[in-house]
């Protein structure tokens, strides 16, 4: 096989028993009767995330299971592929040429299996992890039979690069029902995320032909004779549809390789309680990328075999691999892959860009750390690539066990001896020296990119929200930043394919009503991605909004309400958002109520929640003319000593302010009112220590009461009520006198305030401690005063005008 850099792959600890593994080939049988299927929780056949069921013609079910898993994983992301199962058959068979020993790759994978014979899926999976496959069916068709020269498959490049594989270990047949249900949930999670789960099976022991169902009880568990791929599940699949009755409803949907005329159009159903399933290790392909994702892969380990490397509790184990390279192309190390046999293995990655390990971690630089969560192989993208400068470079990994009681183990691979790689493995001894491994290799691989490449930093989509009807299609448009990225290719995948699917070119298909997320990502670096939110309705979207008025005139201190009607009448409901172009002129609530603020013009707009449809009303606000009557408010009187002085704050942080405002000589006016606020024009805030005291005087004496005079209070500065709020909630008040004034009157307001937000540095400043408003206009002193100023200034006169 033609290699870009590394080599072929290759075996697995199970392979020593694989010669005994028989993969059955069956003739087509009656299909599953239409209508017997119950509703599915996740069935990729309903969303089109499947490839055709194939019919194996020889005993290589293990290879069909691997290619089926690859195709299902990619189909979930909108890609359709037809990979060759026969290719892996020849790749690992020790007699692929017709003579045992002539296939070099079979030697690497522990003598492989026989051509066309039953085996395990592990060698083919390891081959994909080493970029030795898959290839297209057209490049190595099933029609190829008999002994063939090695060159037949040696010069084929992988169509995709597998970067991740998770293995779910087999469990005891005696686990509790709760533990089994948790394992079932884990399998579902993997299938939903990655579209596949490869499992070893024992066919036709506990198989019910009528329902294409399988439940193998504990006493019927036996040796494996087939490999298949789980692609979905149905929680409602009745337990009564099995030969033996399990404890609960529910079954996995499994894709077989015996053609579409077998089972349920090529699929069958395995009970959640199946004991053979407990006995099976389950492999999940978790990451598949384009074949140009990296420049080279450096690898020395191919399959798990030999004595494991222990990582003891509260200890660390440091392993390394060193690789040779040519200097003709500048490279940077961009990713590292690790393989572990247990969950939650802690690691630190160190890189030496020039040289081999000598003593401790001298020459190495720590690049990254983390926890490898799952059993299997994971490619870890480095946050900061490392430029390689020498003919040799090394990667060291410090492992620490998360199991503080029993420790954990690391896998090793027999050291291959036919020259497929240019690398060595090392272990760090207690004396600080590195020991080069003679018979084994470690699973620490490196992935490089050319340093001249311009890497993408982000993905931008033209629309990050879509609203579609069921059956609609929409073409997505996405670009990478920077624009001169070396590889501008963008991929798409749906995170919720049951609602919306997307193909590799970015065409979204709305499957059924609901919400979905679509990812657009760099195929060169899938970690660079963005999301598109898709809402699918089974009703048409709003196309038009009509307002009850398109022009409106509002008089001073008045309110009005607009209504909005949407079209077509049967459109999917959407929240209508109201807004004003100028809240200083008028405000609008989310029910369409408009409130006058001051004279001018504004645009009141109603729009759909996504902003795609809008309608506006042109609003004109008028102000009432002023009468000739007015009153003057003189100096504020400091009630502490009755002095009419500028109001100085001598201790802003602690002092209580007592003062009096007087509004005098109100005469021959109507609708007289004065409004006070405890927030100054510049935002200084005061709080009332008590409610205001109101008193009225004629020209000579205080008047006990005034008919028609009221005081109203506000908590928010806008809405007034005669009901007193809690004193700590008081923001302002207004004195209102409705009858016509027939004689001169004076109004006095006594206030007791506490400074809220003045600080010690405000000491000695002249503070205007209150806003006075007539109507909704603020009138400042006739002399220049900085309301929250920095220089003391005498407060002389306020003019408060009264509206008609």
Image: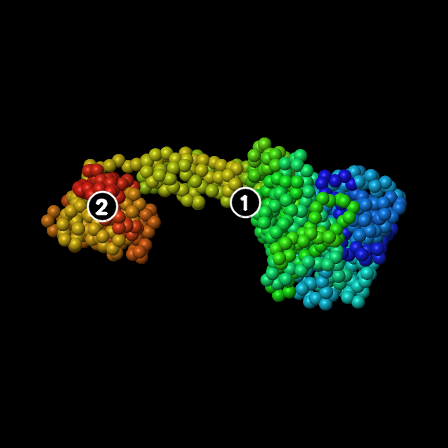
Tell me which residue sits at (70%, 39%) in the image: 291
Which one is earlier in the sequence, the residue at label 2 or at label 1?
1
Coloration mode: rainbow
Tell me which residue sits at (74%, 57%) in the image: 306
Camera-nearest residue between 394 and 522: 394
Specify the label residue 558 is tagged with.
none
Q: What is the x, y in percent for residue 535?
A: 58, 44
In which quadrant of the rendered image does the N terminus lie?
top right
Going by the picture, which residue comes out furthest to the left? 700
**Helix, strand or loop at disc 2?**
loop
Question: In the displayed structure, does residue 753 sit left or right of residue 41?
Answer: left
Q: What is the x, y in percent for residue 516?
A: 60, 46
Provide the residue designation for mark 1: 573
Is there any visible trace of residue 258 in the rendered image? no
Position of residue 274 relative to residue 122, above or below, is below
Question: In the displayed structure, does residue 461 sit left or right of residue 255?
Answer: left
Provide the residue designation for mark 2: 765
Is there any visible trace of residue 20 in the rendered image? yes
Tell me which residue sits at (52%, 41%) in the image: 610
Question: In the displayed structure, does residue 357 sit left or right of residue 2?
Answer: left
Camera-nearest residue between 646 and 89: 89
Camera-nearest residue between 107 and 253: 107
- Mark closer to the observer (2, 1): 2
The quadrant holding residue 346 is bottom right
């Amino acid at each position: 096989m033609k290699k870009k850099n590394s080599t072929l792959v290759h075996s697995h600890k199970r392979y020593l028993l694989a010669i005994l593994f028989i993969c059955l080939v069956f003739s087509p049988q009656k299909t599953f009767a239409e209508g017997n299927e119950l509703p599915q929780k996740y069935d990729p056949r309903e969303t089109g995330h499947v490839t055709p069921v194939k019919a194996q013609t020889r005993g290589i079910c293990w290879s069909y299971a691997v290619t089926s898993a690859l195709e299902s994983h990619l189909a979930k992301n909108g890609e359709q592929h037809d990979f060759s199962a026969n290719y892996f058959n020849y790749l690992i068979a020790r007699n692929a040429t017709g003579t045992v020993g002539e296939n070099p790759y079979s030697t690497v994978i522990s003598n492989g299996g026989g051509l066309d014979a039953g085996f395990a899926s592990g060698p083919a999976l390891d081959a994909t992890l080493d970029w030795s496959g898959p290839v297209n069916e057209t490049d190595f068709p099933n029609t190829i039979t008999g002994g063939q020269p090695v060159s037949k498959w040696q010069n084929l490049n992988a169509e995709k690069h597998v970067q991740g594989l998770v293995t779910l270990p087999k469990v005891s047949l005696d686990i509790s029902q709760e533990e089994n249900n948790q394992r079932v949930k884990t399998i579902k999670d993997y299938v939903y995320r990655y579209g596949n789960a490869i499992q070893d099976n024992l066919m036709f022991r506990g198989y019910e032909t009528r329902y294409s169902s399988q439940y193998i009880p504990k006493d019927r568990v036996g040796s494996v004779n087939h490999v298949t791929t789980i692609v979905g599940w149905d929680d409602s699949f009745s337990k009564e549809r099995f030969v033996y009755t399990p404890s609960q409803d529910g079954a996995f949907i499994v894709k077989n390789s015996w053609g579409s005329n077998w089972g349920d159009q090529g699929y069958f159903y395995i009970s959640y309680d199946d004991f053979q399933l407990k006995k099976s290790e389950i492999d999940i392909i978790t990451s598949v990328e384009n074949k140009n994702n990296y420049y080279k892969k450096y690898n020395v380990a191919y399959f798990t075999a030999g004595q494991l490397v222990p990582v003891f509790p509260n200890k660390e184990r440091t392993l390394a691999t060193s690789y040779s390279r040519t200097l003709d192309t500048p490279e940077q190390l961009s990713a590292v892959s690790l393989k572990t046999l247990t969950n939650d293995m802690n690691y630190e990655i160190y890189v030496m860009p020039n040289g081999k390990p000598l003593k401790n971690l001298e020459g190495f630089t720590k690049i990254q750390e983390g926890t490898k969560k799952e059993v299997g192989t994971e490619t870890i993208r480095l946050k900061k690539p490392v430029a390689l400068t020498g003919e040799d470079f090394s990667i060291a990994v410090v492992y620490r066990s998360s199991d503080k009681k029993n420790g954990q183990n690391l896998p090793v691979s027999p050291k291959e001896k036919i020259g497929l790689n240019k690398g060595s493995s090392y272990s760090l001894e207690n004396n600080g020296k590195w020991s080069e491994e003679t018979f084994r290799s470690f699973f620490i691989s490196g992935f490089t990119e050319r340093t001249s490449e311009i890497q993408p930093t982000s993905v931008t989509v033209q629309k990050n929200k879509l609203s579609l009807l069921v059956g609609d299609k929409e073409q997505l448009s996405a670009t990478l930043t920077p624009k001169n990225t070396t590889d501008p290719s963008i991929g798409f995948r749906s995170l919720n394919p049951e609602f919306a699917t997307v193909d590799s070119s970015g065409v979204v298909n709305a499957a059924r009503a609901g919400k979905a997320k679509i990812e657009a990502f760099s195929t060169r670096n899938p970690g660079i991605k963005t999301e598109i939110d898709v809402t699918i309705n089974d009703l048409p979207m709003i196309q038009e909004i009509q307002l009850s008025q398109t022009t409106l005139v509002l008089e001073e201190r008045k309110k009005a309400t607009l209504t909005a009607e949407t079209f077509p009448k049967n459109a999917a409901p959407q929240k209508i958002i109201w807004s004003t172009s100028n809240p200083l002129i008028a405000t609008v609530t989310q029910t369409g109520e408009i409130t006058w603020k001051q004279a001018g013009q504004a645009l009141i707009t109603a729009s759909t929640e996504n902003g795609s449809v809008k309608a506006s009303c042109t609003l004109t606000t008028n102000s009432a003319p002023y009468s000739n009557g007015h009153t003057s408010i003189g100096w504020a009187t400091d009630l502490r000593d009755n002095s009419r002085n500028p109001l100085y704050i001598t201790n802003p942080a602690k002092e209580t302010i007592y003062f009096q405002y007087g509004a005098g000589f109100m005469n021959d006016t109507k609708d007289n009112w004065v409004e006070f606020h405890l927030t100054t024009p510049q935002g200084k805030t005061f709080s009332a220590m008590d409610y205001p005291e109101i008193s009225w005087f004629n020209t000579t004496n205080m008047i006990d009461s005034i008919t028609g005079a009221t005081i109203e209070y506000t908590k928010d500065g806008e809405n007034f009520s005669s009901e007193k709020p809690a004193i700590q909630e008081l923001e302002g008040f207004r004195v209102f006198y409705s009858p016509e004034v027939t004689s001169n009157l004076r109004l006095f307001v006594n206030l007791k305030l506490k400074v809220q937000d003045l600080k010690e540095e405000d000491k000695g400043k002249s503070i205007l401690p209150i806003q006075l408003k007539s109507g909704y206009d603020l009138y400042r002193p006739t002399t220049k005063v900085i309301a929250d100023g920095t220089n003391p200034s005498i407060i002389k006169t306020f003019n408060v005008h009264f509206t008609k």
